[in-house]
Amino acid sequence: MIRFLISISFTALFANSLQADEGMFPISELARLNLQSKGMQLTPGELFNSEQVSLVDGICRVNGCTGSFVSSDGLIITNHHCAFDAIQKASTSANDFLQKGFIAKERSMEIPAAGYNVRITEGYSDVSAKVLSAVTDYMTFLERTKAIEKRRKQIEQTAEQENKGLRAEVAEMFAGKTYVLFLYTYLKDVRLVFAPPISIGAFGGEADNWEWPRHTGDFSFMRAYTAPDGSSADYSLNNIPFHPKRPIKVAPQGVNEEDFVFLLGYPGRTVRQKTASYFRFEQDVRLPAIVELYGWQIGEMDRAGASDRSIAIKHASRSKSLANVEKRSRGQLLGMVRTSIVATREQQESELQAFIQADPQRKAKYGSLLKDISLVYDEMTSKGPLEIHLKELKSACRAMSFAFTLYDAAVERTKEDIDREAPYMNRNYDLTIQQLKLDIADWDAATDAQMLQGILTRLSKISNSNEVEALKKPLANLDVAASLLKSTRLGQVAFGEECLKKSPDELATSGDGLLSWMIRLYPTYKQLRDVDKERDGRLGQLYGSLMEAKQAFQPSVFVPDANATLRITYGRVRGYSPADAILKTPISTLQGVIEKTTGVEPYITPQEVIDRYRTKAFGPFVHPKLGQVPVAILYNTDTTGGNSGSPVLNAKGELVGVNFDRTFEATINDFAWNESYSRSIGVDIRYVLWVTGWVYNAKHLLDEMGIR
């Protein structure tokens, strides 16, 4: 397949003179960024080239994270927390890879990472006109959203038919305005190769999460495999390692303060183009709810696993994920207050509104835009408590989640493939069912009972919850709900497999009380889904018009929000001052690990690390100025979730670190970026190599990466 690169229509919305370090830029913008003047030693064509092998060929997406191929045999480096689910699923109380780590001494020992896939960007093209041609002026907002969804699916299906073996996805770039079709090599056989113990991979735990200095070795190695003919295939002993077109070269010398660095990766979601009314909703409604709900769930899981390691292992991945979001949300709330983001955005919008009002044509076209957008968020604010808790009911209580997926699948699979919700389309269905079975395997009935009772108790305190008919009896008698959970078979994989073969009517007569309750709730959840789509339709159209107005007002200030597509960001290894009289330097060391070590969670250090520190067995990985093995580095690039695992690359495009976090002040990055406080954190490649080769003697991996 010949890869293609074309100039896409949203480039006209980009700044010609953006701040040097700001922006998660689509790869199409490489030529505009003039990176050579910032310190880059590679040309745009060496980074990405439509005709030849380039650096991007060594970058991949690993589920919701990013990874780098660091050998010609498909070896991938990513974060420990990105591989965490695979480590957890492979662990038992008798063979606990989370606690002791995992090393595959040879390839036959590598463990299948169920539920993982790897994607490599092969090409992209602007399909905005094709997508928007599905919309008419006479559609309702819900019809508009559904028409765009369907057209995007059609484009994806056509692209996959025309490019056999590749995966297609249409991404919205600017809301309601621009859409891009991406083509990916899609690999389904992914295996765990090396993971340090959690005492290294998550050293400092939640206490240090989103903080600096960090002393966390947040890295793991995985490997991608293909069928013998090189095509994508499910796990098989006959599969062979994937051979990337170009692996990323590892630079064991690492970096120094003020060195130029850049990241290529798949940042998740930013919302920098949103209005003050959106930020007010986040600040007053959604974020406080997330902090409370997730904090409570984490506490329940911690209590459940405190005396039973097998239960703790079951909860480990989910608890870690919730904890990450909970602390980020707390940081975002603090950041919104500290930066006065609502007031700042209101002032910007006041200036924009004055500009609109000053011209009769602009006023006629855009005069009510900001008010109309605000009305959507006002509605979300008034209905938010009930909607958020209803959604959490089928998320926090895992059995309710299983029931919803089973019934939703049965309903959706009666439709034509193109009309189904995306998870139940033929191209996605196997992954959906695989994830369902993995989740069922991690189910703990006692914890789920606490989750269900806690959510119902919260719902009972929301005044309009009695509007939901199916909730009235459980809310009036929490023991009814608890009894349903005790008798359900939804925690059995075999029962789930039975249900997947049944029609909606057959499921309704299954005799499982909890499943029957979810079926009664299902119309409420279907209505919530339609309400979300109707709002998306309204906001998509409104934000598209707002972008036009803002472009007329300030034509050169827009970068599309991150959306899990390939982006580049660049900056310097640099410290910062988070508060008066406090200066934080940008490189932490092994000495800091030892100084923090208490022998009590979360500051436990493996004896192997302590022994090598005491004997100064540092190998060639000592920082020349600090006299220690560097552990983590700090840099002022623009990152967000999804950049976890992104390669930190030097000016030559060589791997010097693996991105894993931001500072607490930079949790606000999703909303706004500022060089003074936005800092990202990566594990230094020297610590990766030292831990892998010197501490755990996996020198075969260093050999494979070309480190002699």
Image: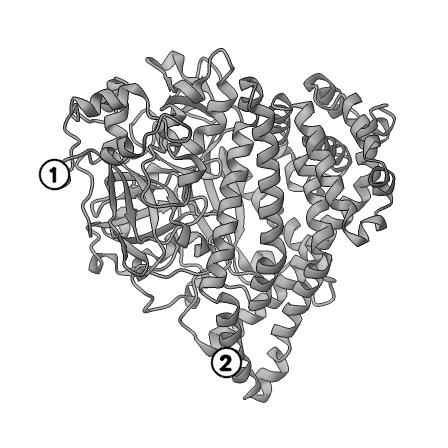
Residue 426 shows in the view: yes
Quick one: label 1, few (<14), some, or many (20+) residues within 10 Å? Answer: few
Asked which quadrant contains residue 100, the reply is top left
SS for callout 1:
loop
Q: CA distance from mark 1 to mark 2?
A: 52 Å
Q: Is residue 371 above or below residue 460?
A: below
Task: Residue 617 in the image: state x and y as whole percent.
Answer: 16, 23
Task: Residue 139 in the image: state x and y as whole percent.
Answer: 73, 63
Position of 457 compared to 315: left or right? right
Viewer-nearest residue: 369 or 292: 292
Residue 624's mark?
A: 1
Location of the C terminus (image quadrant):
top left
Q: Are marks 1 and 2 in contact (CB under 8 Å)?
A: no
Look at mark 2 in the image and give the residue it sits on. Answer: 351
The mark total stands at 2
Task: Residue 310 in the image: state x and y as whole percent.
Answer: 56, 18
Q: Amino acid at mark 1?
A: Pro
Q: Residue at x 32, y 47 (%)?
A: 263
Q: Is residue 547 above or below residue 224?
A: below
Task: Residue 404 in the image: state x and y as whole percent.
Answer: 73, 35
SS for callout 2:
helix
Q: Residue at x 49, y 18 (%)?
A: 91
Q: Amino acid at mark 2?
A: Glu
Q: Residue at x 25, y 35 (%)?
A: 685
The label nearer to you, 1 versus 2, is 1
Residue 54 shows in the view: no
Which coloring applies here?
Answer: one colour
Quick one: label 2, few (<14), some, or many (20+) residues within 10 Å? Answer: few
Position of 565 compared to 221: left or right? right
Location of the N terminus (image quadrant):
top left
Viewer-nearest residue: 454 or 549: 454
Say whether disc 1 or disc 2 marks the residue closer to the N-terminus: 2
